[in-house]
Amino acid sequence: MITVNHMEPLVRIKRLVIARHVLFTEKAEGELASESLTPELIYESILNAPSIFKALRSRNPRTGVTEKLYVIKGLTFDGLDIYTKGKILTKEGVDVFYVLISSKRSTDV
């Protein structure tokens, strides 16, 4: 049996999205508003993403701890290409996908 912590990261993130275990930073919420996006569009793009576009190692500026960030590019059901960057963390004993930096319309062609 595979435990949740050893699942492929995209599968784990998609399951967190389905369970609505997603948090957005204030910055990400501001980006959503400025791009006229909704959390539901972000969820759709993550659920439709075929793979993780990029996994990055980053140092948390507040704690200094190294963490893994995931960049996910996916399409909404209407074909809108959205780029999302976030990390998996445990908050109050529950795993969540934390959208950190950006959720925006992808400018890649």
Image (cartoon, rainbow, N blue to C red):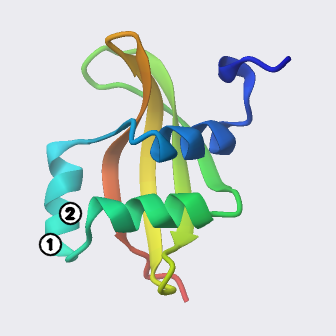
Q: Which residue is mark 1?
A: 34
Please give the name of the residue rendered at 32% of the width and 11% of the height, measured from the top-left corner: 92
Give 57 or 80, whichever is nearer the viewer.
80
Judge from the rendering whether residue 46 lies leftward or rightward of residue 10; answer left or right: left
Q: Quadrant of residue 68?
A: top right
Q: Residue furthest right?
A: 1
Neighbourhood count class around disc 1 (C-alpha, 10 Å): few under 14, some 14–19, many 20 upward? few
**Type of amino acid at the residue the image marks with label 1:** Ser
Q: Locate the N terminus by quadrant.
A: top right
Estimate the x, y position of residue 105 in percent, counting from the top left.
Answer: 37, 76
When the figure is inspected, residue 108 is found, relative to residue 50, above or below; the finding is: below
Percent x, y of residue 91: 34, 17
* Above or below, 39 relative to 36: above
Q: Quadrant of residue 37?
A: bottom left
Mark 1 and 2 residues: CB-CB less than 8 Å, in contact? yes
Residue 102 on image: x %, y %: 32, 57
Q: Give the secondary structure at mark 1.
A: helix
Identify the residue at horizontal 35%, vertical 25% (top origin). 60
How many C-alpha atoms fall within 10 Å of the one at disc 2: few (<14), some, or many (≥20)? some
Q: Is residue 37 above or below residue 66?
A: below
The residue where tag 2 is placed is 31
Q: Position of residue 83 (x, y in %)?
A: 45, 65
Q: Residue at x 43, y 51 (%)?
A: 85
Q: Quadrant of the C terminus?
A: bottom right
Residue furthest to the front in view is: 19
Q: Report the label total.
A: 2
Residue at coordinates 62% horizontally, 63% vertically from top-left? 49
Q: Amino acid at mark 2?
A: Glu
59, 69: nearer the viewer: 69
Residues at marks 1 and 2, CA–CA distance in whole angstroms: 5 Å
